Amino acid sequence: MRPFQYQRAAGVREAIAKAEGCQTCSFLAGGTTVIDLVKLDVEKPEMLIDVGRLPMDTILRDEEGGLIIGANVRNSDLAWHSDVQRDYKALSEALLSGASPQLRNRATTAGNLMQRTRCPYFRDNYSPCNKREPGSDCAALAGYNRSHAVLGGSDSCIATHPSDMCVALAAFEATIRVEGPNGSRSIPFADFHLLPGDTPHLEHALEQGELITAVTLPPKRAGTASTYLKSRDRASYEFALASAAVSFGIEEGCIVEPKIALGGVATKPWRCYEAEKNLEGQVASLSVYEKAAEVALAEAEVFECNAFKVPLARNLLARALSEVEGRLARQSEVI
Ligand code: SF4
């Protein structure tokens, strides 16, 4: 491991000031990703700026009834928060399906947003990898690409985004609040993670020195329910081969406000706008769900080892949609 400087920031502005002009500085909170990558010599920060003790660890309601989740809220605390359990069930389920209890106790909301891919070629530090070393080529395109993306890839990179939490945040249309040298701003979730294109080493919309301070969720729409389903090689402590976060309501038998995002199959948390359009106003039924799932995967491009992901994701999505219908029926029985 290379030597690096470690500094603890006493406040948000101080953290930003420390990072200003430093291209290779990273913020550190839970450390569950960044420390791994430093040990592997994949990330080579000149300085780690510890923001883990800054008071950004609360979950609050905003004036409209949405949720403001501090950047340092631990994944476990977020998953078990009563408002999240009640109003954003898919987010709770996504968080609880990720990593292990120990990691969830440590990992933060902002850190989860900044997770980097589990592509083995990215992490082995010797294979050609455009994400780790721009212009070096992509070993996965003609290599062992079983875990790789079928949506959103490019000729430069087909690495999947690893987060479960982010799939639910995509479906709930979260917003990311950041502070930087030029003040504060908000980034719609759909714009936060970047497609790889020709520059897979650029993964997010943060500008140099910007720090994530919170994630906000819009108020839950009355009469909706949500779920997160995940398929993986083993029952715990494993990344998704395919996952789906789904939310909608049913009014007079018809689907309203459908929101769908997929994980494990795309280079970023993958919002399925066309599939949502396909569902809106339809009479809820399995065949409608199957059609929407077909639309969601219509643009998929498969590689030698990952063609199985297309039917897997389709079936998982149709099942997630059915599950939400079931939850809505149970909710109405309770009412
Ligand atoms: Fe690197 Fe992306 Fe190719 Fe993996 S898929 S080797 S991360 S360029």
Image: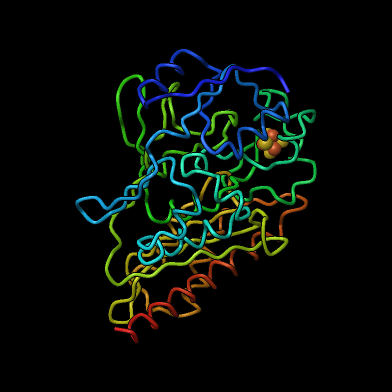
Which of these two is toward me, 255 or 28? 28
Image x and y of residue 75, in percent: 50, 50
Quarter of the rendered structure image containing ligand 1: top right
Q: Is residue 265 left or right of residue 255?
A: right
Screen quadrant of the C terminus: bottom left
Which of these two is toward me, 267 or 307? 267
Identify the residue at horizontal 60%, vertical 40% (top origin): 32
Task: Give above or below for 104 relative to 319.
Answer: above
Identify the residue at horizontal 65%, vertical 65% (top origin): 312
Screen quadrant of the N terminus: top right
Q: Which residue ends up furthest to the top in the rendered image?
A: 21
Identify the residue at horizontal 30%, vertical 62% (top origin): 220
Image x and y of residue 279, in percent: 40, 68
Occupied quadrant, residue 185: top left
Image x and y of residue 61, in percent: 27, 53
Occupied quadrant, residue 326: bottom left
